[in-house]
Each structure stands twice: as structure tokens, then as C-alpha cells.
Image (spheres, rainbow, N blue to C red):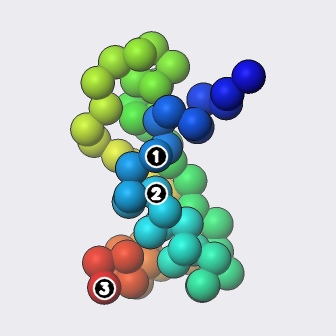
Amino acid sequence: MPTITAQFLDRPIFRIVSEVAAERGVRAFVIGGFVRDCFLGRPRNDIDIVVEGSGIDFARAVGD
């Protein structure tokens, strides 16, 4: 049986965020409306991510 992540977390940005989090030794979480919309089967374009530590530094690393 596939998990919910199998069809909703297949965008390249999730791989990038995961790799940056692993490199920095921090945890990152998808939160908010994206998660709700996954459960409700709605279109999902706005992704909110919370990270332990500095979100600005993390965003810069993801951007690089």
C-alpha cells in the first residue's frame, strides 16, 4: 500500500530540501495548507516549510 508521501512529495524541491537538511543536520517539515490539501485531494501549489534553526540561512542554502 503506497503512503501519502508517494504521490504528494515527488516534486524536486522536496529532494533538495531533504538533502540540505541532511547536510546541515537539521529537520525540515512540510506544514500548513499543502498538507491539508494533500489529504483533501486539492491542487497544491503553495508549499510551507518550517526548519529548525535559521530559516533564512536554510532558504539561501536551498536556493544555491
Crowding near the residue tagged with mark 2, few <14, some 14–19, many ≥20 C-alpha atoms within 10 Å = some
Q: Nearer the viewer, residue 54 or 46?
A: 46
| Residue highlighted by disc 1 | 10
Crowding near the residue tagged with mark 3, few <14, some 14–19, many ≥20 C-alpha atoms within 10 Å = few
| Residue highlighted by disc 2 | 14
Q: Nearer the viewer, mark 3 or mark 1?
A: 1
Q: Quadrant of residue 43?
A: top left
Where in the figure is residue 45, as x and y percent of width and height? 26, 38
Residue at position x 38%, y 60% in the image: 13
Mark 3 element type: loop
Where in the figure is residue 58, as x and y percent of width and height? 43, 78
Distance from Cα at disc 2 to Cα at disc 3: 15 Å
Residue at position x 49%, y 62% in the image: 15
Where in the figure is residue 57, as x and y percent of width and height? 40, 84
Q: Amino acid at mark 1?
A: Asp
Left or right of 52 on screen, residue 14 = left
Q: Number of numbered discs present? A: 3
Q: Amino acid at mark 3?
A: Asp
Q: Nearer the viewer, mark 2 or mark 1?
A: 1
Mark 1 element type: loop
In this orientation, does residue 15 appear? yes
Residue at position x 67%, y 81% in the image: 25
Rendered position, 28 above or below 4: below
